[in-house]
Amino acid sequence: MKSNDPLKREDWSFLETFGSIEEEKDWQKVRSQMKQNRTIRIARHWKVAAVIVTVLGLGYLTMQLAGPSPETMRIAAVDGIREVTLPDGSLVILNRGSSLNWPEKFRGKERSIILKGEAWFEVESDPSRPFIVELDRADVEVLGTRFNVKEDSLNGRISVQVEEGRVAFSGRQGNVALSGSADQENRMIMKAGEAATMNHHGVIQAEKVDPNELGWRTGILVFEQHTLEQVAAILEACYGTPIDLDPAIEPDLEFTSTIVKEELAAVLEELCLVLGLNYKQEEGRIFLLPEL
């Protein structure tokens, strides 16, 4: 006769075994998935790290090749003439009211500086690295020479006078076509003993060399039947002192003399003696007056 008692506990043991088998399989799957996800995350991290290292490495290499950005030096001739020696040994003499910017060390294939106003240059020769003077509307390029550059922002004129060597005087792109001996590339090649001026329209023309243009540096002025108005303008540029003419002075007065490194007071004494004038100085200005 069959028994009606429920199954004993040991009769259910196969279910526990089955359950443990399923749990173990599931746990193996979970662990496998976790390992796979971890591997993917690690791989992604390494990829990101590799990109960062590559970028940093390229940046460092670029800095090493290009070198650090050079510090910009500046000098301004506020009250008088200033002199500076550039990193390559070139000499620059700044006229009153002018300023110069240059790198602490010249790098690359050019030696570029920025000029505001007027300066005389004696450039050390270096055929592999041209020396470039950058102005507002023009550039002056040389290899090694002596020359003077004057930027008159009031009248929009830029003048170049060459003492030695050769220079290329170039208007910036956008200026009108040049005249004279300028070539198709908007450049005028100048040699020793030549001068040129670019007007406010961007036109470069050859000019007669005027020794008085360098009077501020040399102290030598040559007057040959110059009008009093011309004399006053030259003295003002040379000595940096404004000179005003009294309207009562005869307009056709002319002056002839050679001045060699004299003080302004001595020049004014000579001028007044020759032309029968007087002068007075007030608040940093000179006033030329008719003889009393």
Image (cartoon, rainbow, N blue to C red):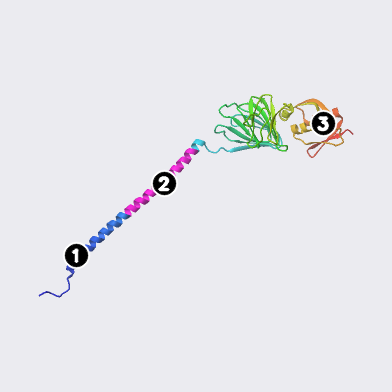
Q: Residue 47: image x %, image y %?
A: 40, 46
| Separation of marks 3 and 2 at Cα, in angstroms | 78 Å
Residue identifier under label 3 = 228
The amino acid sitting under disc 1 is: Phe
Which mark is first along the chain, 2 or 3?
Answer: 2
Tell me where residue 216 sits by quadrant: top right
The span shown in magenta is 34-62
Q: Nearer the viewer, residue 40 or 53?
A: 40
Residue identifier under label 1 = 14
- The vertical placement of 184 against 283, above or below, is above
Which mark is first along the chain, 2 or 1?
Answer: 1
The amino acid sitting under disc 3 is: Leu
Give the residue at x 37% y 48%. 43
Q: Residue 203: image x %, image y %?
A: 69, 33
| Separation of marks 1 and 2 at Cα, in angstroms | 52 Å
Q: Secondary structure at mark 1?
A: helix
Tell me where residue 3 sits by quadrant: bottom left
